[in-house]
């Protein structure tokens, strides 16, 4: 008898402990971690060696579970009812009390959410009773794995377990549709086609490339999205100006610190990692920035972060945040 039941049980237990588990979906293998845990999500970014915090897809076991985290629109609900479980990911607004790690959204106010159809993925999600954040289980810049052995080659030494479900049936990643604007926008074409989508909803606009590069969207779509306040899925940008590479701090500034010693001069301080641990810093980044942004400070001063490993991703986000609010 195959001991797949035992494997699922073990994989679910590891997820609950905050460890990373690769698992099969019908599209590609995912590199899964507990989507409620900043630490587990930071570990995913680190294991992939991602150069930036590209947001992650959250996998859920049911429509009801998705309900806990995102705001449905009428069209999104229609798509979910028709295509879930299956290879369709929808980008939707986070609920105000959404418990998902802010890191899965990479600081956006949206979540990409999906209910996979693969029986092992479903069994794992049911057993773990958790939402599971999972990008494709490849190292950054490589193609997505469609067999357990691919995952083993790329990430075998970095993750707790690979749940082997044989080759993936779909083999290309899910279709990603942004449902947060006035026009549904296909951010990533996949096995659910434009034609299939438009049988259920009004005709979606197609955009190739990363959603982060939204400037590459067709002019009209960009225009519509900017016109609709609150609809633009921009990067998280603090409302306070930011001062990077700060080695001192003024009394009317808030300080985002890293490591020790921390310059004295203000009471508004959050330390990303007193021990200088970049993984911990990544896990804390968005939460701490938000906290400092909620203070009365004039500026957020940010101590230097080493430009290595996860520090590259952290600095990338800090630079973007600092650049945005200078405009
Ligand atoms: O088939 C799949 O989708 C696989 C399996 C494992 O589910 N996952 C996958 O994940 O391909 P990943 O991380 O390789 O690609 C996710 C895509 C990225 O292009 C990312 O930018 C986009 O979804 N995405 C995730 N969250 C988003 C958000 N909140 N807003 C816009 N795009 C988002
Ligand atoms: Mg990928």
Image (cartoon, rainbow, N blue to C red):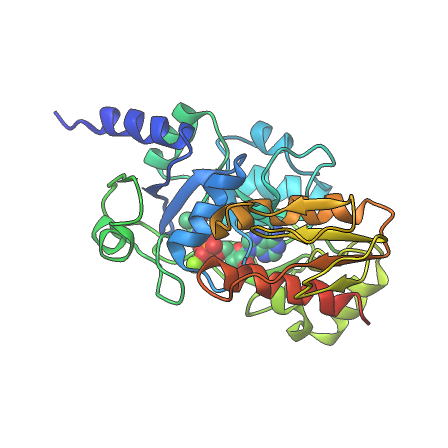
Identify the residue at horizontal 59%, vertical 34% (top origin). 66
Q: Quadrant of residue 239?
A: bottom right
Q: Nearer the viewer, residue 73 or 159?
A: 159
Locate residue 41, reporting x and y percent.
Answer: 49, 44
Q: Nearer the viewer, residue 293 or 274?
A: 274
Q: Relative to residue 127, is residue 83 drawn left or right?
A: right
Residue sitting farthest toward the left? 1
Q: Quadrant of the N terminus?
A: top left
Q: Nearer the viewer, residue 295 or 62?
A: 295
Identify the residue at horizontal 32%, vertical 31% (top origin). 11
Locate residue 76, reporting x and y percent.
Answer: 66, 44
Locate residue 157, reporting x and y percent.
Answer: 25, 50
Identify the residue at horizontal 38%, vertical 52% (top origin). 47
Find ligand 2 in the image and state its quadrant: bottom left
Q: Measured along the vertical axis of the image, is residue 23 above or below residue 213?
A: above
Number of disc labels:
0
Q: Measured along the vertical axis of the image, is residue 80 above or below residue 199?
A: above
Q: Measured along the vertical axis of the image, is residue 281 above or below residue 21?
A: below
Locate residue 282, reporting x and y percent.
Answer: 54, 50
Confirm whether residue 183 shows in the render: no
Q: Measured along the vertical axis of the image, is residue 56 above or below residue 208?
A: above
Confirm whether residue 272 shows in the render: yes
Identify the residue at horizontal 52%, vertical 36% (top origin). 37
Q: Quadrant of the C terminus?
A: bottom right
């Amino acid at each position: 008898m195959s001991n797949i039941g035992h494997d699922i049980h073990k994989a679910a237990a590891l997820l609950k402990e905050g460890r990373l588990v690769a698992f099969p979906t019908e599209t590609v293998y995912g590199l899964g971690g507990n989507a409620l845990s900043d630490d587990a999500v930071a570990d995913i970014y680190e294991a992939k060696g991602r150069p930036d915090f590209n947001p992650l897809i959250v996998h859920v076991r049911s429509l009801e579970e998705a309900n806990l985290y995102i705001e449905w629109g009428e069209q999104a609900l229609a798509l979910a009812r028709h295509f879930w479980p299956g290879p369709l990911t929808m980008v939707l607004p986070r609920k105000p009390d959404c418990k998902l790690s802010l890191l899965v959204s990479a600081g956006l106010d949206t979540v990409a959410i999906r209910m996979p159809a693969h029986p092992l993925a479903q069994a794992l999600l049911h057993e773990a009773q958790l939402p599971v954040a999972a990008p494709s289980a490849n190292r950054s810049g490589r193609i997505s794995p469609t067999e357990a052995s691919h995952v083993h080659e790329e990430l075998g030494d970095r993750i707790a377990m690979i749940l082997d479900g044989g080759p993936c049936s779909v083999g290309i990643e899910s279709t990603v549709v942004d449902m947060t604007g006035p026009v549904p926008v296909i951010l990533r074409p996949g096995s659910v086609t434009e034609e299939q989508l438009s049988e259920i909803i009004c005709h979606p606009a197609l955009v190739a490339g990363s959603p982060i590069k939204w400037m590459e969207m067709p002019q009209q779509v960009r225009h519509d999205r900017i016109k609709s306040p609150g609809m633009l899925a921009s990067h998280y940008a603090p409302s306070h100006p930011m001062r990077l590479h700060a080695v001192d701090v003024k009394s009317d500034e808030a300080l985002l610190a890293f490591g020790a010693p921390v310059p004295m001069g203000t009471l508004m301080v959050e330390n990303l990692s007193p021990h200088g641990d970049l993984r911990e810093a990544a896990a804390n980044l968005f939460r701490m920035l938000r906290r400092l942004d909620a203070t009365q400070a004039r500026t957020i001063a940010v101590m230097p972060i080493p430009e290595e490993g996860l520090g590259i991703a952290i600095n990338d986000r800090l630079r973007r945040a600092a650049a945005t609010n200078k405009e």
